[in-house]
Amino acid sequence: MKNSRKKDVFGNAKKWILEAGNIIRQKIDDPLEIDTKSNPNDLVTTMDKDTERFFVEKIKSTYPDHLLLSEEGFGDEIPSLEGTIWIIDPIDGTMNFVQQKRNFAISIGIYHDGIGEIGLIYNVMEDVLYYAKRGEGAFKNGKALMPLEKGLVLEESVIGLNHLWLCENRLVDEKIMQDLVKTARGSRTYGSAALEFAFVAEGVLEGYLTMSLSPWDVAAGMILVDEVGGVTTTIDGEPINLLTRNSVFVGHPDIHKRIIKDFISKGRK
């Protein structure tokens, strides 16, 4: 994507994500229609759908040649990553949105011919915007995020995990994961993959590991993390496929290498 085009797209994406967040804050206490999708804990609300429609209308009217891959089904059928594709999660952390009214984000990753060009993650209720453009660094509310420090060790690191590694059909042995939790300085669960990616980019977390995420959960965060020197792969160290669900492991390169070598590779089923 040419720089002039990228600047224009980024400007609009930033304006729209802030506008959408403002609408959500204004309506945060309004009655919600809540449905479930794949299981009783997989929630979707009228706000998810309305926010996605907001982006569809903005993008399609401004960039009719761009495609949209999004969670709630208002986007396009995407057979490949050719062209310019907006990968959007209108509310990442819907359960947090419903029950806590905080700790959720709007996530937008913009890819051109499979390359991540622009990523934005907006922590709506705290009014904190993380963003990155390829080759230009990552930022938090306009302040540059520093490259990840070298020489970190797992014993001094905090790792983001969720409960899915305890569930049926888990991909990594439970005892190995327990050893990982015991070895790290600490573990945290925030309930929003987009925010956990942002926290890795910021250095708040040294890693985040989960067994199954969709493209819209990770598309923006991958761009942010890459800009500060982090690594995003599957739990086996393979590249992420942005057209399917994946296991995901994002983190500081030293921590990423250590966990795959000393824990995941030994605990894979």
Image: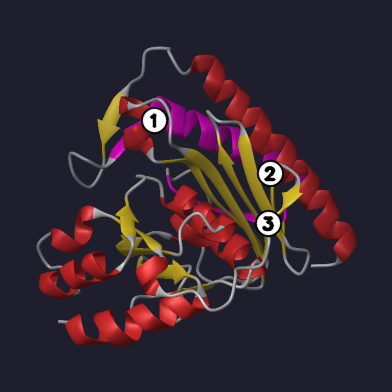
Verify CB contact (< 8 Å) between mark 2 and mark 3: no
* Element type at mark 2: helix
Instruction: Check the image and report above or below for 265 versus 28.
Output: below
Which label is found at residue 206?
Answer: none
Residue toward you, 241 or 207: 207
Q: Where is 267 relative to 169, above or below?
A: below
Q: Which residue is mark 3?
A: 145
Colouring scheme applied when the structure was drawn = secondary structure
CA distance for labels 3 and 1: 27 Å
Picture coordinates of residue 259, whole percent (x, y): 34, 78
Q: Kindly identify the amino acid type of the residue bearing the numbered disc 1.
A: Phe
Q: Which residue is mark 2?
A: 59
The kind of residue on which mark 3 rests is Leu
Give the SS element for disc 3.
loop
- The single residue placed furthest to the top in the displayed view is 30
State whether residue 237 appears in this view.
no
> At 24% from the left edge and 64% from the top edge, which residue is drawn?
181
Separation of marks 2 and 1 at Cα, in angstroms: 24 Å
Observer-side mark, 3 or 1, equals 3
Q: Quadrant of residue 238?
A: bottom left
Q: Is residue 3 visible?
A: yes
Q: Residue type at mark 2? A: Ile
**3D distance between C-alphas at marks 2 and 3:** 28 Å
> x and y percent of residue 186 in the render?
32, 58
Horizontal side of 144 relative to 54 (left or right) equals right
Q: Residue 99 appears at what percent x and percent y?
A: 30, 26
Check if residue 113 falls in the magenta segment.
no
N-term-proximal mark, 3 vs 1: 1
Label 1 belongs to which residue? 97
Give the residue at x 43% y 36%.
103
